[in-house]
Image (cartoon, rainbow, N blue to C red):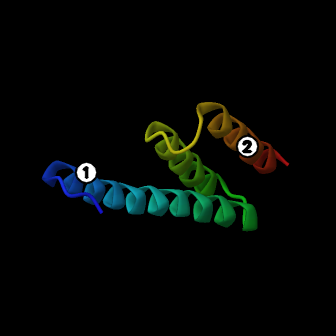
């Protein structure tokens, strides 16, 4: 563990951010699974929104977000 006060604060902030990021990723995955189980327009919007939130926070790359949304849209169309 760090000895310097600012380093201790930074380590605590990193822990909080990691928890927040994992919760965001978990919400994204659960929204996608809910859509895949029962593809509806409303669930597509929820999954798409959660993907966009993860992208805007830097949790996933923009190309991955685009690819995921495209795959979900194709499932909705079929």
Q: Name the residue under label 2.
A: 73
Q: Who comes first in sequence, dot 2 or dot 1?
A: 1
As helix, strand or loop, the secondary structure at mark 1 comes to helix
Q: Position of residue 25 (x, y in %)?
A: 53, 57
- In depth, the one of 77 and 58 nearer the eye is 58
Using the numbered discs, state the Cα–Cα distance from disc 2 to disc 1 in whole angstroms.
Answer: 40 Å
Q: Which residue lies furthest to the top in this view?
A: 63
12 above or below 45?
Answer: below
- Image quadrant holding the N terminus, namely bottom left
Nearest to the observer: residue 12 or residue 52: 12
Q: Name the residue under label 1.
A: 10
Q: Is mark 2 on a helix, strand or loop?
A: helix
Total numbered circles: 2
The numbered dot on residue 67 is none
Residue lying at 27% horizontally and 55% vertically, measured from the top left? 13
Asked if marks 2 and 1 touch (Cβ < 8 Å), the reply is: no
Q: In which quarter of the image is residue 63?
A: top right
Neighbor class of circle 2 (other Cα within 10 Å; few <14, some 14-19, many 20+) is some
């Amino acid at each position: 563990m760090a000895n310097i006060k600012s380093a201790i604060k930074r380590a605590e902030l990193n822990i909080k951010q990691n928890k927040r990021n994992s919760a965001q990723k978990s919400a994204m995955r659960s929204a996608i699974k809910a859509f895949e189980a029962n593809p509806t327009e409303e669930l597509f919007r929820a999954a798409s929104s959660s993907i966009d939130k993860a992208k805007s926070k830097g949790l996933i790359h923009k190309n991955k977000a685009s690819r995921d949304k495209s795959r979900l849209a194709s499932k909705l169309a079929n």
